[in-house]
Image (cartoon, helix red, strand yellow):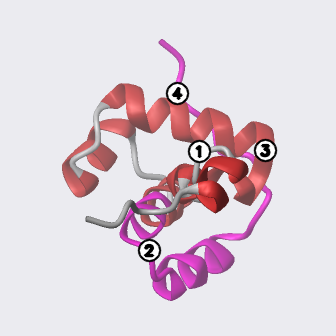
């Protein structure tokens, strides 16, 4: 197995700044992982530091290499959509008793 390499989308200092400025816990952990990797930490060291699995670390590094800083964003918040049809929301009227 070859060592995971980190693409140079950001400098080590920029990764540290992003880590320290992150307000969302998931994003903060991801920035920390990338920052530590840029400092030369190995995957086993990253596993110890972050608690993430080898697979999760490898996927994050791969996604970061492919998509840059956008890969760090926690996209779960994008799922907050009202899936009810608009006409059902507008036409609902409670029945009087």
Q: Tag 1 or tag 3, which sits nearer the N-term?
A: 3
Query: From mark 3 to mark 4, how far is it between C-alphas?
Result: 19 Å
Q: Tag 1 or tag 2, which sits nearer the N-term?
A: 2
Please tell me whether residue 96 is drawn above or below residue 37 in the rendered image.
Answer: below
Q: Tag 4 or tag 1, which sits nearer the N-term?
A: 4
* Crowding near the residue tagged with mark 3, few <14, some 14–19, many ≥20 C-alpha atoms within 10 Å: few
Q: Nearer the viewer, mark 2 or mark 1?
A: 1
As rendered, which of 5 and 56 lies closer to the eye? 56
Q: Nearer the viewer, mark 2 or mark 4?
A: 2
Q: In what quadrant of the picture does the C terminus appear? A: bottom left
Q: Tag 4 or tag 3, which sits nearer the N-term?
A: 4
Q: Which mark is residue 24?
A: 2
Q: Which residues are magenta?
A: 1-30
What element does badge 4 sit on?
loop
- Residue on which the image places disc 3: 67
Query: From mark 1 to mark 4, how far is it between C-alphas?
Result: 43 Å
Which image quadrant is residue 49 in?
bottom left
Q: Which mark is residue 3?
A: 4
Q: Tag 4 or tag 2, which sits nearer the N-term?
A: 4
Q: Nearer the viewer, mark 2 or mark 3?
A: 2
Query: From mark 3 to mark 1, how far is it between C-alphas?
Result: 29 Å
C-beta proximity under 8 Å, tags 1 and 4: no
What element does badge 3 sit on?
helix
Q: Please give the name of the residue rendered at 26% of the width and 43% of the height, measured from the top-left corner.
A: 47
């Amino acid at each position: 197995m070859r060592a995971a390499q980190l693409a140079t989308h950001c400098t080590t200092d920029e990764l540290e700044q992003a880590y320290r400025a992150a307000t969302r816990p998931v994003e903060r952990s991801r920035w920390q992982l990338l920052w530590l990797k840029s400092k030369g930490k190995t995957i086993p060291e990253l596993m110890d530091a972050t608690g993430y699995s080898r697979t999760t670390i490898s996927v994050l590094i791969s996604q970061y290499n492919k998509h840059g800083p956008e890969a760090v964003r926690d996209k779960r918040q994008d799922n907050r959509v009202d899936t009810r049809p608009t006409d059902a929301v507008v036409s609902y009227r409670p029945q009087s008793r």
